[in-house]
Amino acid sequence: MAFMRYRALPQGEPTVEEFRAWLAQFDADRDGRISREELQHALRSLNVWFAWWKARGGVRAADANGDGGVTGDDEVARLFAFAQRHLHAKIAQLGFY
C-alpha cells in the first residue's frame, strides 16, 4: 500500500483560491471535478469524524448543477462556505482560520 503526503490547509484566513488549490490535490482522476469519494478522502486526511457523511452533505450543498460532484468556481465557493459552517471547529484547530 502506498502512502501519500498531502499539503496541509493554509495557515491564517484562507481564500477560496487557496481552498481550491488544497482540494485539487484530492482530484484522483484529474477530471477537474471533486466527487463525493474524493471529498471523503480529503476529509479523512484532516481526521474528520464521519467523513463519508460529511462528504455527502458537502457535495449536496455545493452541487448546483446536479452532476454529483463539485465543479467550477461557484460550486467550490459553495463547498468552502459549507466547510466554514459545518467543519469550523476542525478547520480552526488546523490553523485554517
Image: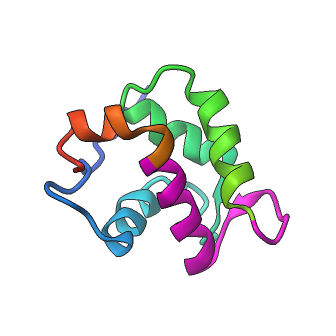
Give coordinates of residue 10: x percent, y percent: 20, 57
Q: Residue at x 43, y 38 (%)?
A: 87
**Location of residue 28 by image quarter:** bottom right
Figure coloring: rainbow
Relative to 71, is 13 above or below?
above
Q: Is residue 60 visible?
A: yes
**Between 57 and 85, which is closer to the camera in this rendering?**
85
Q: Residue at x 52, y 69 (%)?
A: 77
Residue 67 lies in magenta, yes or no?
yes
Relative to 63, is 97 above or below?
above
Relative to 49, is 67 above or below?
below
Report the span colored magenta.
Answer: 64-84
- View extreme (top): residue: 49
**Between 96 and 52, which is closer to the camera in this rendering?**
96
Relative to 40, is 34 above or below?
below
Looking at the image, residue 34 sits to the left or right of residue 64; the answer is: left
Q: Is residue 30 visible?
A: no
**Between 4 and 96, which is closer to the camera in this rendering?**
96
Q: Main secondary structure of the magenta part?
A: helix
Looking at the image, residue 79 sits to the left or right of residue 42; the answer is: right
Quarter of the rendering occupied by the N terminus: top left
Give coordinates of residue 4: x percent, y percent: 34, 40
